[in-house]
Image (cartoon, rainbow, N blue to C red):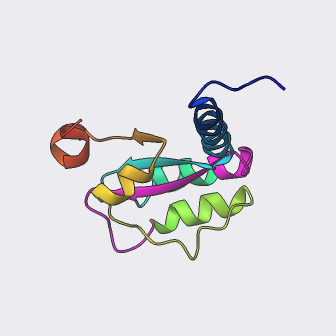
Amino acid sequence: MSQMQPGATTTFASEVVRNRQRLDERKKVKIIIFACVHNAGRSQMAAAFFNKYADQAKAHAISAGTQPADCIHPEVVQMMSEVGIDLSQGKPQKLTDELAREAGMLITMGLRRPMSLCPWLASK
């Protein structure tokens, strides 16, 4: 029986753990955030279309705003219903640092000065 070098078992075990972690990372669903100022139109529509056509096992979109409105614009709800997407129960939400940190990608829409409106972006 051949002798293993000291530490070889530890190194092998460490490599197995690292490989499993990499595989787990690849399996995780990526969060994509579409952000605009009021989160009542563009970003809601973008996230809804993304979710309709993307492989939900790989990525899922949410939308948020730097200064969220009280509700999604009624004309947006109407237009989206005409293409088979129901936003009637949707509600604008605040783009927070915590929300942004969870994202694999943050897409800003219509923010003239996104760095000044999103502190998390400004710190990167």
Residue at 53% in and 60% down: 76
Q: Residues in magenta?
A: 50-72
10 or 38: nearer the eye? 10
Q: Position of residue 16 (x, y in %)?
A: 67, 38
82, above or below 108, in the image: below
Q: Position of residue 113 (x, y in %)?
A: 20, 37
Residue at 74% in and 45% down: 55
Image-based side of 104 in relation to 16, left or right: left
Number of labelled discs?
A: 0
**Residue 69: in magenta span:** yes
Residue at 46% in and 56% down: 63
Q: Position of residue 74 (x, y in %)?
A: 49, 69
Location of the N terminus by quadrant is top right
Image-based side of 63 in relation to 19, left or right: left
Location of the C terminus by quadrant is top left
**Residue 60: in magenta span:** yes
Q: Quadrant of residue 22?
A: top right
Image-based side of 104 in relation to 2, left or right: left
Q: Is residue 38 visible?
A: no
71 or 13: nearer the eye? 13
104, above or below 78, in the image: above
